[in-house]
Image (tube, helix red, strand yellow):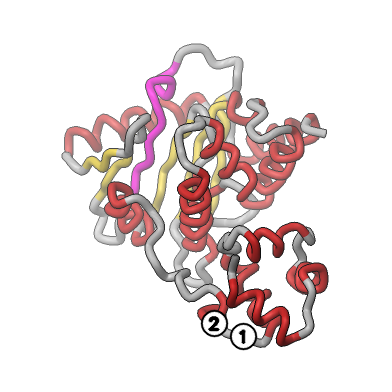
Amino acid sequence: MNDLLRAALHETGHTLESLAERVGVDPKTPARWLREDRVPHPRHRAAAAEALGRDIVDIWPDTTRRREPIWFRPWQDIESEAVLLRSYQSTVLPGLLQTEAYARAVLTGGGLLPRQDIERHVANRLARQAILARPENPPRLAAVVDESVLRRPVGGRATMREQLTALVTAAQADHVKIQVVPATVGAYAGLNGPFVLATADDHQMAGYLDNQLQGTVVSDADDIAAILNVWENVRAEALSHWQSVDLISEVAETWT
């Protein structure tokens, strides 16, 4: 139970339903914030705090605590300072572009994480997305995904429709480019696994390789050169940005 949120609701006369209306979310969502002590998305935290006449830290004092696993922290620091991120995913969408429901479904699907850890990972994944919404100098994100990612029913039909609609919206931003490798492509280098490349403002580069246990950060020049070679390969097989957006929109309509 989030006692600070409960007290703010009591003192202001707000109900969960009236708070949901002010914030613009489903009425069930504030109930999760209250009873499950779930940390809202940053924009929802700000809107809820404003509606309740409180500072964010008065209701969610621990939002500045680091929630990511220790092994992930080096990459998250690199990611937050990057000016360019190049991401290839063959099985799921990039974490920086996932909706809350999709992220929760991905993290729940394996059945390997305790419930409290899933919520911590979801909160961290959503918090990371703030770098793309920075008003000044957000990183450029170039994301390539395999078409199969769009068609895998992660979280169910409603979750997929919401996720692909959000993906189309994200693609409208000048600093976000999304490309899809169509299903008609046979074997290509991306099938060997996902990766992310980060470039800093001093042109230094680092890579992130994911696996079943934890991710690995690489910076060796030969490793970076090899990943860049794979990146060029998957880009060459992909549709253009706007062709990809059209395909994502078409697939979104099938998730009804």
Task: From the viewer's perspective, tell me whether residue 124 is left or right of residue 204.
Answer: right
Residue at image point 37% right, 30% down: 212
Residue at image point 57% right, 31% down: 180
Closer-to-camera residue (122/85):
122
How far across and down, in percent of the image, does residue 88 sit? 45, 35
Closer-to-camera residue (5/120):
5
Label 2: element kind: helix
Instruction: State whether residue 45 appears in this view.
Output: yes
User: Dot 1, how many residues are within 10 Å of its Cα: few (below 14), some (14-19), or many (20+)?
Assistant: some
| Residue numbers of the magenta segment | 188-198
Task: Locate the C terminus and report the quarter of the image it occupies.
Answer: top right
Magenta residue check for 197? yes
Q: Amino acid at mark 2?
A: Asp
> Which label is found at residue 54?
1
How far across and down, in percent of the image, does residue 185 sit? 54, 16
Q: Label 2: which residue?
A: 58
Q: Amino acid at mark 1?
A: Arg
Q: Are marks 1 and 2 in contact (CB under 8 Å)?
A: yes
Label 1: element kind: loop
Residue at image point 34% right, 61% down: 81
User: Dot 2, how many residues are within 10 Å of its Cα: few (below 14), some (14-19), or many (20+)?
Assistant: few
Instruction: State whether residue 199 appears in this view.
Output: no
121, above or below 107, in the image: below
201, above or below 98, in the image: below
177, above or below 155, in the image: below
Magenta residue check for 245? no
How far across and down, in percent of the image, does residue 172 sit? 65, 53
How far across and down, in percent of the image, does residue 198 sit? 34, 49
Closer-to-camera residue (97/103):
103
As measured in the structure, the alpha-carbon distance from the residue carrying label 1 to the one carrying label 2 is 6 Å
Task: Locate the N terminus and report the quarter of the image it occupies.
Answer: bottom right
Determine the image quadrant of residue 105. Answer: top right
